[in-house]
Image: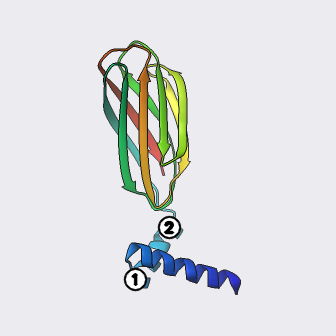
């Protein structure tokens, strides 16, 4: 009985915060029960000024677990300190990353994914950090 009441209260809070009705919420719950997932392979480019750069990305994520890796494809020289956060939660913090090295990650998102990536290059120059991200959810 207590579990039913808690779930009912939680459903009411979700509907109030998102502006959806009970029918829409039931459809969302069904989608989550079906374990829908997928994969993303995406290239990225980040301008680096005087050895540092940053990137922000936000998306509604519905509380999924994301597993994957990132790979730097350019520049050829130097090492990188990469810090990726989802809000205040550190997804990864890796130092000494070089070209073609895979950096694995795993995170469980909230309702919304709010990623920030900071990159510091061992060389204090301007360049473009290029890479590829592979992720499964």
Q: Residue at position x 43%, y 73% from top?
A: 17
**Where residue 51 sits: x, y (%)?**
37, 20
**Which residue sits furthest right?**
1
Quadrant of residue 9 within the rendered picture: bottom right
Badge 1 density bin: few <14, some 14–19, many ≥20, Cα 10 Å: few
**Which residue sits furthest bottom?**
1
Along the viewing direction, whichever of 111 and 37 lies nearer the viewer: 111
Give the secondary structure at mark 2: helix
Quadrant of residue 8 within the rendered picture: bottom right
Q: Residue at position x 41%, y 25% from top?
A: 72
Is the residue under label 1 in contact with that under label 2 (CB below 8 Å)? no
First in residue order: circle 2 vs circle 1:
1
**Where residue 45 sits: x, y (%)?**
31, 31
**Where residue 129 sits: x, y (%)?**
34, 25
Label ID, residue 21: 1
Which tag is nearer the camera, tag 2 or tag 1?
1
Give the secondary structure at mark 1: loop
Q: Residue at position x 37%, y 14% from top?
A: 124
Per the model, the C-alpha gap separating discs 2 and 1 is: 17 Å
State whether residue 67 is above or below residue 61.
Answer: above
Q: How is the image coloured?
A: rainbow
Label ID, residue 115: none
Label ID, residue 32: 2
Q: Residue at position x 50%, y 41% from top?
A: 68
State whether residue 76 is above or below residue 101.
Answer: above
Along the viewing direction, whichever of 105 and 88 lies nearer the viewer: 88
Horizontal relation, residue 113 to residue 65: left or right? left
Image quadrant holding the N terminus, namely: bottom right
Badge 2 density bin: few <14, some 14–19, many ≥20, Cα 10 Å: some
**Where residue 65 sits: x, y (%)?**
53, 53
Horizontal relation, residue 103 to residue 48: left or right? right
């Amino acid at each position: 009985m207590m579990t039913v009441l808690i779930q009912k209260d939680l459903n009411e809070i979700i509907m109030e915060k998102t502006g959806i009705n009970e029918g829409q919420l039931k459809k969302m719950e069904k989608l989550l029960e079906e374990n829908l997932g997928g994969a993303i392979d995406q290239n990225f480019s980040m301008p680096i000024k005087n050895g540092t750069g940053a990137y922000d990305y936000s998306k509604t994520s519905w509380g999924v677990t994301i597993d994957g890796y990132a790979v730097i494809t350019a520049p050829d020289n130097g090492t990188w300190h990469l810090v990726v956060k989802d809000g205040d939660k550190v997804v990864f913090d890796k130092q000494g990353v070089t070209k073609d090295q895979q950096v694995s990650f795993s995170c469980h998102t909230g309702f919304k994914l709010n990623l920030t990536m900071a990159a510091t290059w061992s060389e204090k120059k301007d360049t473009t950090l290029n890479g590829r991200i592979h992720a499964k959810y």
